[in-house]
Image (spheres, rainbow, N blue to C red):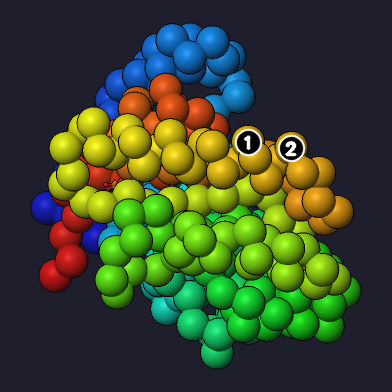
Amino acid sequence: MTEKLSSELEQRFLDVEENLKVVRGRIEEAAVQSGKSPKEITLLAATKTVPVEVINRGIALGIDHIGENRVQELRDKYTSYDLSNCELHFIGHLQTNKVKYLVGQVSMIQSVDQMKLAKEISRLSEKKNLSTDILIEVNIGQEANKSGVLPQNLYELVDAAAALPGIRIRGLMAIPPAGAPEKETMNYFSQMHQYFIDIKSKKIDNVSMDFLSMGMSADYYQAILAGANLVRVGSALFGPRNYH
Ligand SMILES: *Cc1c(COP(=O)(O)O)cnc(C)c1O
């Protein structure tokens, strides 16, 4: 390793340590403000483009959930993550033909938005004698060309996917429209929380609404106020992304 590279890494290590304190502090504040214990909120570090050395530093500092959103990147990094005390989630758009790379490798797939995908996860999980935890991703802003099931099709998908033997539905995930005014974003978060509570109250077999995954660097505080208990934070922990 060259001197320059190692000092760059050293700086990123220090940044992650500092950023993690700040993010944890704000999560704690938001939790208390919404009448929850900070322990009820899971911080998942979104690690796309982040070098494994930096991710592992974060894990050493106590990050216990990480999420990748590209299958190829996850595969490239997989053997280098230190996952002995950390869960790995898949949080990005997923094609059915890539499911084989994730089943048995990740502890949760957060981005299931159609039956075809749920069926393939179930099928490959059964084949490996395991069951895979999933979240249903909702296209809460009803945006064109965005992943997620439309709200009007959510209940139908939950019911159908719940019948599959190889998966367990553990909650919901959403990414509201980027750059919307705070009030509008709050509205989307509240709608998601409403779906979450409503589905939970139905007590559907094989559906446990344990996780409401929403909120990223710009809005995790607001998301927690609206009821999120899993926030996915990238740049606020690791700095701006370098896509090369
Ligand atoms: C990148 C990413 C995040 C984190 O985004 P930041 O704005 O950097 O916090 C969260 N969720 C998903 C699905 C992502 O792809």
Q: Residues within 10 Å of mark 2 (few under 14, many from 20)?
A: few
Residue toward you, 105 or 13: 105
Three-letter amino acid code at the position of disc 2: Ser
- Position above or below: 117 against 214: below
Alpha carbon of mark 1 to alpha carbon of mark 2: how far?
A: 6 Å
The residue at the far bottom in this view is 97
Residue toward you, 62 or 80: 62
- Horizontally, is 205 left or right of 216 in the view? right
Q: Give the image quarter of residue 118.
A: bottom right
Q: Are marks 1 and 2 in contact (CB under 8 Å)?
A: yes
- Horizontally, is 198 left or right of 244 in the view? right
Question: Which residue was labeled with disc 1?
Answer: 197
Mark 1 falls on what kind of element?
A: helix
Q: Residues within 10 Å of mark 1 (few under 14, many from 20)?
A: some
User: What x and y, as percent, mark residue 82?
Assistant: 55, 52
Mark 1 within 8 Å of ligand 1, using the beta carbon: no
Where the N terminus falls, by quadrant? bottom left
Mark 2 falls on what kind of element?
A: helix
- Position above or below: 198 against 53: above
The reply to whether residue 8 is in sight is no
User: What x and y, as percent, mark residue 110?
Assistant: 54, 58
The residue at the far front in this view is 152
Three-letter amino acid code at the position of disc 1: Ile
Residue 201 shows which numbered tag? 2
Instruction: Residue at 50% x, 29% y: name it.
Output: 227
Instruction: Residue at 71% x, 56% y: name it.
Output: 169
User: What x and y, as percent, mark residue 65?
Assistant: 54, 44
User: What x and y, as percent, mark residue 179?
Assistant: 16, 47
Instruction: Residue at 43% x, 34% y: name it.
Output: 190
Instruction: Residue at 59% x, 21% y: name it.
Output: 39
